[in-house]
Image (cartoon, rainbow, N blue to C red):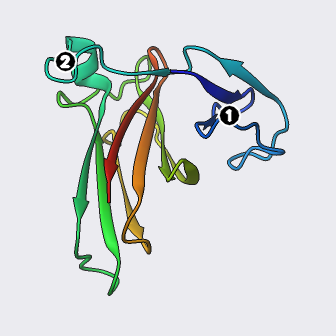
Amino acid sequence: MKGIVCKVCGYISIDGTTPTACPVCGAKSFEEQGDAIHQPGDVTNFSESEKKHIPAITVVPTCGLIEGCKDVHVKVGEIIHPMLAEHFIMNIDFYIDKVFVARTELKPDKINPAAALHLKVTSGKLTVIERCNKHGAWISETNL
């Protein structure tokens, strides 16, 4: 899948536009990449690699922490992705209606490849992109 990628931090613009500045790091250096994001070949039959990379999204309609919010839980992989110094998930980016809203940075060894958000919005399309240090960016989407 095509994307416009920040040359500094790897943020990917998925709305087809080049930002004036990266919403993650502020850089102004981007390049269009035809293969910026991997998608599954067959959504009914994931390969072994896809099972370790496709973000699994769970939307929890009622938050236990903040009244009126909706929780989103993301884990990387149907088969949990390794988090080793030589092979790990670097970050998980969240978009609502193709607009970037948050990034969770991950470090290997002491953390699992997962993240959660408490959303104020109650509707829209949620897109999650995770970035593996060896196998690049992978995408998953769901409606809120």
Q: Which residue was labeled with disc 1? A: 9
Which three-letter amino acid code belongs to the residue tagged 1? Cys
Sequence-wise, the earlier of marks 1 and 2 is 1
Assign a secondary structure to mark 1: loop
Assign a secondary structure to mark 2: loop
Judged left or right of residue 12, residue 143 is left
> In the rendering, at what x and y percent does residue 80 appear?
22, 31
Instruction: State how many labels appear.
Output: 2
Which three-letter amino acid code belongs to the residue tagged 2? Phe
> In the rendering, at what x and y percent does residue 4 appear?
67, 29
Q: CA distance from mark 1 to mark 2?
A: 28 Å
Tag on residue 89? none
Which of 123/5 is in front? 123
Judged left or right of residue 35, residue 66 is left
Residue 27's place in the image compared with 64, above or below, is above
> In the rendering, at what x and y percent does residue 57 appear?
27, 47
Task: Please identify, in this view, whether the residue under mark 1 or under mark 2 is nearer the observer.
Answer: 2
Give the residue drawn at x 30%, y 41%: 112
Tell me the crowding category of disc 1: few under 14, some 14 to 19, or many 20 or more residues within 10 angstroms, Cα based: few
**Visible in this render: residue 109?**
yes
Give the residue drawn at x 41%, y 60%: 124
Give the residue drawn at x 58%, y 37%: 14
Q: Which residue was labeled with disc 2? A: 46
